[in-house]
Amino acid sequence: MSSRLQIILFTLFLTTIGIGVAIYKALVLEIPFTPNENTSIYRVGAKITFNGTDKPIKISLALPNEQSGIKILSQQAASQGYGYNVSETKYGQRAEWAKRKASGDQSLFYTIDVVVDRNHQVKSPKTVIIDQEEETLDSWDNQTRDAAKALLAEVYKRSADPHSFTAELIKRLNEKQGSQAATLFTSKEGGSLEKVVYKLLRYQGINTHLVRGLILEGGRRNLHLKSYIETYDGKTWQLFSAQKGRILKPQNLFIWQRGGKSLLDSFGTRNADVTFSITQRSVPAKKLALDDALLKGSMLIDLSLFSLPTSEQNAFRHILLIPIGALVVVFMRIIIGIRTSGTFMPILLALAFMETKLLTGLLLFVAIVGVGLIIRSYLSHLHLLLVARISAVVIVVIGIMSIFSILSYKLGINEALTITFFPMIILAWTIERMSILWEEEGGKEVYIQGGGSLLVAVLAYFAMSNDMVAYLSFNFSELLLVILSIIILLGRYSGYRLLELVRFSPVKEF
């Protein structure tokens, strides 16, 4: 296998892994590809109010279950002085409070945090648990029961399946000519048209249940759950409004109770009621996704940089930008043909510019190197050995930086105080290399390589300081494998640099 084919396969392998892991993070773990992306978290609060009667008190509230499209993040009860537990019933979970004795106005609270998530899917049950008495009309008198049977028989003829039957039944109950029947039925069910439709559907043998929920919208208070009807045709559940008929489920409909006999049960109390409030807050989508992934025990996140302490994470935010600078250096040197003083000195300068700001960093760099070259020219007359000469230059650089810092502080130029972010050893080597270059090649070559280094450093600075690049390099660090692949491919290029084409362009005339 040729080396060229090996490189192609190797880079293709690295690229596939890098892009594949990034897509997995975005689609499965739901880590956003863009920074500053926020997600709305809704806090739904249930407030139970009642009057104590100096008797033992028991309160039971139906709790919501997992549902498609809305993810439950956390649940919490506030019940000072009350015993509290969550019990499992055949209808689902219920929160239960108890107290031996209480009097006067009492309040209990239950809060739940949810987020709208289209990717969150829960398998819907095909049947619901009901009591046998819900399938009869025994609680109605004979006249009302006969009217209901006649209505159901007529609706049956004009329908083809459970969904169409439900739609036709609701339509008939809301028509003017059916208003008398609707009034008669609702009088038997406490004035609730939803309960009438539900009971008639159950009597007809249709798999249905009542749904109580809230539309998630921040800043709402003193709400009561709105009732809907769901029917099952053997394949799908369909939502209905007792007034409008067939409806589409709103994306932000949070179903608090599906099925079950009662929302709130109370014993030993008077005037018990439950109201709901909704508040909304925005949180970073990335934080929400990471918390969810850690909760699920994702190995990819557990073994990633996200598991490190915050201080180490901040260090890697800068370290992971170095490959971006390396890509800029490789491209500018191999493809464009820019000559620099040192291979990766521009990357270190770009890191320093990110701390000092670009213009301040450029001025400080030119000033330090300029003064350093003058002093280095004097040291060359002392005929020192290389190690001693470099050490002397390092000390000189430290002295120059100290003097600049003191002068800038006294003059009130606080920006110059960031001079300490420059790498001293690199500055010393830069001064030494430029001095030798001046002696061997002349001042022109010094300006070419020095200017090239600053140009590449500036370009690397713009690439590394970009918010999007910084976000992707840390949160999708596997994409660095793609950058590695590009650098390897650029490393195989052996053609003309762009500047060489400009240099040899006069040859074309001959």
Image (cartoon, helix red, strand yellow):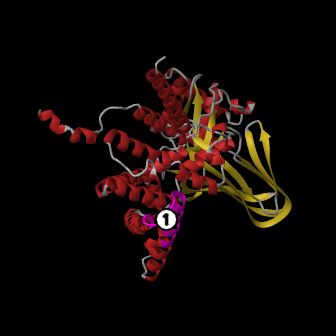
User: As shown in the figure, which amino acid type bears the numbered disc 1?
Assistant: Val
Relative to residue 274, is residue 143 depicted above or below? above
User: What is the span of residues highlighted in magenta in the rendered image?
Assistant: 379-399
What is the x, y in percent for residue 115?
Answer: 57, 47
Q: Which of these two is toward me, 428 or 84?
A: 428
SS at circle 1: helix
* Magenta highlight on residue 433: no
Q: Position of residue 219 (x, y in %)?
A: 53, 59
Residue at horizontal 62%, vertical 47%? 306
Q: Quadrant of residue 125?
A: top right
Snapshot quadrant of residue 100: bottom right
Is 427 rendered above or below residue 237? below
Q: Which corner quadrant of the image does residue 153 belong to?
A: top right
Is 393 part of what is drawn in magenta?
A: yes
Name the main secondary structure of what is drawn in magenta.
helix
Measured as percent of width and height from the top left, residue 487 is found at: 44, 37
Q: Is residue 444 visible?
A: yes
User: Can you name the residue that lies furthest to the left here?
Assistant: 509
Q: Which residue is mark 1?
A: 393
Q: Is residue 134 left or right of residue 438?
A: right
Asked if residue 226 can be seen in this view, the reply is no
The image shows residue 157, relative to residue 32, as above or below, that is above
The residue closer to the viewer here, 498 or 460, is: 498
Quadrant position of the C terminus in the picture: top left
